[in-house]
Image (cartoon, rainbow, N blue to C red):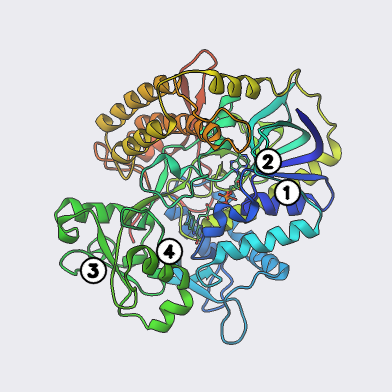
Amino acid sequence: MQHHTFDACIVGAGGAGLFAALEASQSASVAVISKLYPTRSHTGTAQGGIGAALGNMEEDHWEWHMFDTVKGSDYLGDQDAIEVMCRDAIDVVYHLEHLGLPFSRTPDGRIAQRPFGGHTRNYGEAPVRRACYAADRTGHMILQTLYQQCIKNRVTFFDEFQVLDLLVEDGRTAGVVALELRTGELHVFHSKAVLFATGGFGRMYRVTSNAHALTGDGAALVLRRGLPLEDMEFFQFHPTGIRKMGILITEGARGEGGILRNKDGERFMERYAPTLLDLAPRDMISRAIYTEIREGRGINGEDYVLLDLTHLDPKVIEERLPDITDFVRTYLGLDPIKDPIPVQPTAHYAMGGIPTDVDGRVVVDEQNTVLPGLYAAGEIACVSVHGANRLGTNSLLDILVFGRRAGADIARFVKEAELPPLPKEPDGNVRAEVERLLGQQGKEHAATLRRELQDAMMDKASVFRTEEGLTEMREKLGELRERYRHVHVGDRGHQFNTDLLETMELGFMLDLAEATVESALARKESRGAHYREDYPKRDDANFLKHTLFHRKEEGGFELRYKPVTITRFQPKERVY
Ligand SMILES: Cc1cc2nc3c(=O)[nH]c(=O)nc-3n(C[C@H](O)[C@H](O)[C@H](O)COP(=O)(O)OP(=O)(O)OC[C@H]3O[C@@H](n4cnc5c(N)ncnc54)[C@H](O)[C@@H]3O)c2cc1C
């Protein structure tokens, strides 16, 4: 076992982790621990853009951005946090520009902006151009820029190290335990502060835009330490994944003028969202697509519709959407300039996660009590700025605004805090679990269990939900958990044992699927991405509140609730 000491450990090297590391490293010693090589993090696949009311193309204000985000969240987002995000947005984008991010430009040299779903001018009148972008490689540019800056600032990187436990001693955060992929060796990282920035967990669904590594490790580790997860019932399906593959076609394609059509060639969004049409929020468009399919208007009677870009100027397609054009040519053998693209909703984004305040500090109960030294930021955190449904471009914004704020708070915290003692045998838990998995002779295989989990979640806990389906899913999870206890890890070696790590990741996903399903069963209303066919209306009287899912020590779980912070905008019916 190897031992390291730093002021702060950042777990995850996506946009959130890197911006936090960069900020904290101004005055603290910082380690970034990442199971992937940093620039392979999912942030690098983000295509469309980052939202900020710069007003470069037309009039825009952060208050409008705030209103759109609150309305998009179906009024479940905390408005104090949303205000912070939309105000900070402008500064964060210029900060990135000054760090060297090569944004696409207007002819007069300013940062170019394009429309995105749910972003409007003057409180809902019409779409506004708010998304700042670097062609359709915005996330790639963010990651490269921040990684370079971290290297320049002497952040220490531990690449291909997978964190498998969080250490808490005397009610304080004491570090993490990680397994080095290359050697199989365990490393204890002793620190005053830990930030989880481990990204989403779309891999619990069959059709997803998410990378293979998005298995929710950080959230599961926190849950296993007795801390709650917030609003786990809200999982976003993006309307335009490439059919069957789930690979994302950015909303930027509709921002540039793309149109969704059913088998009759009809622009069906005219019936669902007469003002914003194809730029309505994602929850609404995903439901509209499923409704078209259910009513027999899918293409050839099958489970997909078409995204039509053929009326656009080929130059716009080639210059502003080069990557997705390439994907469609490579994966489908179609040319978006001439052929409409077959699409269906794809599991995309976790609105729920580890509850935090606006400085990234993890809060452990309904009173928002802070656990000293523990932080979370990025997709794995729930601040909550997205509430029941996130708007496009608001995730890159969220990870950067709150990653940077968390980094700044960590720098403040570690200056004053002492290094807490380590627990006795800090790596004991992980060692025992690794030995158990490598030692046992079960009949079950992780790949089979994972596929069954993904299929069942897709059928029973996705865009449309019912009491019956969710209850079946609860039972299925019970069965899968039992079978997981008898799982067999074929590779018994130590070096690059991805079989072992994937098995552990399956364990994380089973935990998070349980949190999702139980939170969804209890929410007997429809709000944002959580649509209950048996309770099709939003019910503010009973459910205008955040869910907190806890695991009980003696087994089982408990759901608690905390109020939504409402400052400027009272809940209204959502019409687009
Ligand atoms: C295809 C696609 C396109 C998108 N496009 C946009 C867009 O245009 N605009 C927008 O706003 N949002 C977009 N999103 C959403 C947005 O990109 C993500 O929500 C965001 O990038 C997540 O960033 P993150 O820093 O939280 O995590 P990630 O970038 O996912 O990084 C997670 C990090 O955690 C590390 N990690 C995970 N588990 C462990 C562990 N156990 N031990 C050590 N390290 C670990 C990984 O190595 C990785 O470095 C898109 C998402 C996808 C999937």
| First in residue order: circle 2 vs circle 4 | 2
Q: Quadrant of residue 299?
A: bottom left
| First in residue order: circle 4 vs circle 1 | 4
| First in residue order: circle 3 vs circle 4 | 4
In the image, which disc is placed on residue 250? 4
Q: Where does label 2 land, which residue?
A: 195
Q: How far apart in space, not on screen, are marks 2 and 1 (Cα)?
A: 9 Å
Q: Are marks 2 and 1 in contact (CB under 8 Å)?
A: yes
Q: How far apart in space, not on screen, are marks 1 and 3 (Cα)?
A: 45 Å
| First in residue order: circle 2 vs circle 1 | 2
Q: How far apart in space, not on screen, are marks 4 and 1 (Cα)?
A: 29 Å
Q: How far apart in space, not on screen, are marks 2 and 4 (Cα)?
A: 29 Å
The residue at label 1 has a CB less than 8 Å from ligand 1: no
Number of the front mark, 3 or 4: 4
Q: Where does label 3 land, which residue?
A: 267
| First in residue order: circle 3 vs circle 2 | 2
Label 1's element?
helix
Residue 163 in percent (x, y) is at 64, 35
Instruction: Please name the residue shown 59% across and 71% down the image.
Output: 54
Q: Amino acid at mark 2?
A: Leu
In the image, which disc is placed on residue 407? 1
Image height check: is 538 above or below 113?
above
The residue at label 4 has a CB less than 8 Å from ligand 1: yes
Q: Amino acid at mark 4?
A: Thr
Q: How far apart in space, not on screen, are marks 3 and 2 (Cα)?
A: 45 Å
Q: Quadrant of residue 459?
A: top left
Crowdedness of circle 4 by 10 Å Cα count: few (<14), some, many (20+)? many
| First in residue order: circle 1 vs circle 3 | 3
Q: Amino acid at mark 3?
A: Arg
